[in-house]
Amino acid sequence: MSFELLDGKALSLTIKEEIKEKVDQIKEKNLRPPHLSAVLVGNNPASESYMKNKVKSCDVVGFTSDLIRRDSDATEADILSIVHDLNKDDGVDGFIVQLPLPDHIDSEKILLAIDPSKDVDGFHPHNFGCMAQGLDCYLPATPYGILLMIERHNIETSGKHVVVIGRSNIVGTPLSILLSRKTDVGNATVTLVHSRTKDLSSITRQADILISAIGKPFYVTADMVKDNAVVIDVGINRIDDLSRKSGSRLVGDVDFEKVSLKSSYITPVPGGVGPMTVVALMLNTLSAYNKKLS
Ligand code: NAD
């Protein structure tokens, strides 16, 4: 069976080009471009790399951006004070606080302090609630990126059985809600499975669209997937690989080599969902900018 690659890298470049055209029009009117701020605490290598991509993408689409860094011993009060300043700053359309934060900082407290109108990661309960009710909001970046990927590849979701593995607040749970809404790229019958699900494989085998967001390398094997399924791999896992100079490489949750042979569409890792998450963040920032002007 031949599969089509859901190439998030290529699609993200196309969408970034579309965003850039809009930003060019803004600049032609002598208005300031959208601005995204980012807060990074500590030096987690994965977070450093995600941040680098986000800042670089701002440059590509013509946004301005700034990265506010603090050492891992920064206090919760320090970070709350940064959040309050960003909330008040009229020159900042949206901002993100990169997770995970060091253990001594209460992430929930920090996320709750973010003004929902600037919460372009879409993590604030206000945005989550509006998303669940189909009201205007910032969609959480990773689920939003996945919806865009499905939409741009004209993959039908209406009436399909979608199985989402993993129930986090930032990926699995919002995805399950979004895909079951009565909208385009919705109207699916969604099953959310997780670590307490019994006989998980018997459920994943029923999926027309299977989405894995658990963070376990090669967890989804070919016997868990129906023939011709669409497979979307959100997982990002670093595993040892002595054939690489770095001694490691990134893989998803899905055993790509074998699962791809049964799939109609499948995302690679890296180069699948990751770049789409960044593009969704850019779209949310543009929308924050436009809302401020209107
Ligand atoms: P999380 O740890 O918050 O949640 C993982 C979920 O998986 C939990 O709900 C848990 O119940 C479930 N789970 C764990 N083991 C399981 C098992 N054996 N069977 C069934 N369910 C199981 O993780 P998260 O933040 O949602 O991230 C998940 C993965 O996606 C990670 O690898 C993360 O790095 C990646 N991620 C990627 C992007 C991207 O842009 N590509 C964005 C966010 C997260």
Image: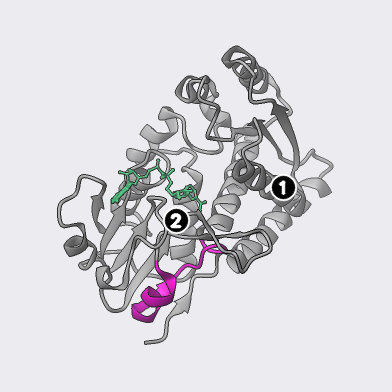
**Which quadrant would residue 288 be assigned to in this image?**
top right
Q: Give the residue drawn at x 71%, y 40%.
A: 34
Question: In this view of the protein, can residue 264 be seen by the observer?
Answer: no
Left or right? Give the position of 25 relative to 195: right
Question: In this view of the protein, can residue 169 be seen by the observer?
Answer: yes
Q: Mark 2 against mark 1, which lies toward the viewer?
A: 2
Mark 2: few/some/many CA within 10 Å (<14, 14-19, 20+): many
Where is residue 108 shown, x and y percent of the image?
45, 24
Where is residue 191 shown, x and y percent of the image?
23, 54
In this figure, which residue is indicated by the disc labeled 1? Answer: 58
Magenta run includes residue 110: no
Residue farthest along the top direction in this orientation: 77
Quadrant of the drawing holding the N terminus: bottom left
Q: Give the residue drawn at x 22%, y 68%.
A: 205
- The residue range painted magenta reads 255-272
- Numbered label tally: 2
Secondary structure under tag 1 reads helix
**Which quadrant would residue 264 be assigned to in this image?**
bottom left
Left or right? Give the position of 55 relative to 161: right
Residue farthest along the front direction in this orientation: 242
The CA span between labels 2 and 1 is: 22 Å
Secondary structure under tag 2 reads loop
